Amino acid sequence: MRIVLIRQNYRPDGGAERFVTRAAEALGAQGVDMVLVARNWPQNAQGLHIERCNPPYIGSLSRDIGFARCACRRLPALQADLVQAHERIPCCDVFRAGDGTHREWLIQRRRTMGPWGRLRLSLNPRHAYTLWMERRTLLSPRLKAVICGSRMIRDEIARHFPIDPQKLVVLYNGVDCARFHPRVRDERSTVRARLGARDDQFLFLFVGSGFYRKGLRVAIEALAAMPRSDTGLVVVGRDRHGPRYAKLAARYGVGRRVWFVGAQSDPLPYYGAADALVLPALYDPSPNVILEAMACGLPVAASRQCGSAELLTEGASGFVRDALDVAGFRDAMTALAEPDVAPRMGTRARTDILPYDLAHMSGRFIEFYRGLLAPSPTQAERGA
């Protein structure tokens, strides 16, 4: 079996990139030949062959158009049994909607904008192109299935597009529960000492690049509004406007309790140093960080605009609030910081995520692919 994956760019801290790497390693071990068509990707996954597709471009719109054309033209020579795109490209058999729907993202984004911002959004040619390609991809006659990393994504696609519901398959990303494990706390004191945080200080962890989309402003405002003044926030991720958020924390009086550590290729030490994860994302269809935090035994406060938040049990393994509900996140974070609450809820979080272990989910993906490639009864009869 040969599966061709399409993903334009590699980012070491990206959720989609980690999914592709894990999928390649797991499926490669099962004898599946994996080829990745990409503009830029390091050879870092066992069994993954890279086909570079890097046409010249001027600007982001030209970049996306050029890569889509290049990838589709390259496919015939690769002789794939199945083509899975992680980009909005209509020349695929399977579309993994890892970024959710652009249409829903714009709806959520407009909630934070005034009239002029909404007008600029509607006139942006890149958004118009992305919406057009999204519709072409989801309504393509070639499309056999859409992998949805959460029920949230499945429901959004069904709501926004006249697509056959049978094509919408919910498959969670999966998490390596042996690697992401409560034992990461063994280095807790060392990491905290490096940060300058006390051992008894309650630390929230925020993981994600693109701070606007991930909801860092709400996390900082909620931290500042908490009745306790000894809690802290560790921010793992990057953003070109990072200094603005540092100034925001200072303006709210929590500058010395918010640590910006940048993007990390290995976030494990910070899971070990933290007591809970907070992710008030404006829109995050299937964030791996929630699964990873739960596997490490951390409770989670997340927005209902996070697809993976549907794996949380309200009040038992975490709390789910609207992305813009600062008071709601303040209350959730205050509850988590109460004595003995986080350890108890973290134990439940770990138990709840075990069925989504990477090995189990890899088996479900292989079953999914084999089901797509199996001959239909009519074809089998013709072959006989």
Image: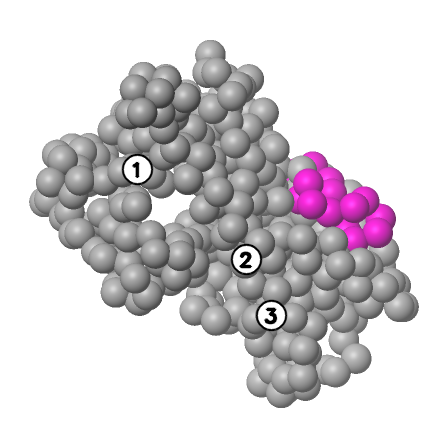
In the picture of the structure, the residue carrying the numbered disc 2 is 358
350 in magenta: no
Tell me, yes or no, if residue 2 can be seen here: yes
Q: Nearer the viewer, residue 261 or 88?
A: 88
Q: Position of residue 49 (x, y in %)?
A: 23, 57
Name which of mark 1 and mark 3 comes first in the sequence: 1
Q: Nearer the viewer, residue 147 or 189?
A: 147
Q: For numbered disc 1, what is the local secondary structure?
A: strand
Which residue is pictured at 39% across the width and 23% down the height? 376
Q: Amino acid at mark 3?
A: Ala
Q: Position of residue 260 (x, y in %)?
A: 53, 68
- Distance in Å between CA atoms under marks 2 and 1: 22 Å
In the picture of the structure, the residue carrying the numbered disc 1 is 82
Q: Is residue 301 left or right of residue 289?
A: right
Callout count:
3
Q: Quadrant of the C terminus?
A: top left
Q: Over which residues does the magenta segment extend?
A: 309-324
Which residue is pictured at 25% across the width and 29% down the height? 91
Q: Amino acid at mark 1?
A: Leu
Which residue is pictured at 82% across the width and 67% down the height? 343
Name which of mark 2 and mark 1 comes first in the sequence: 1
Say which mark, if any, is on residue 178: 3
Q: Position of residue 64 (x, y in %)?
A: 23, 37
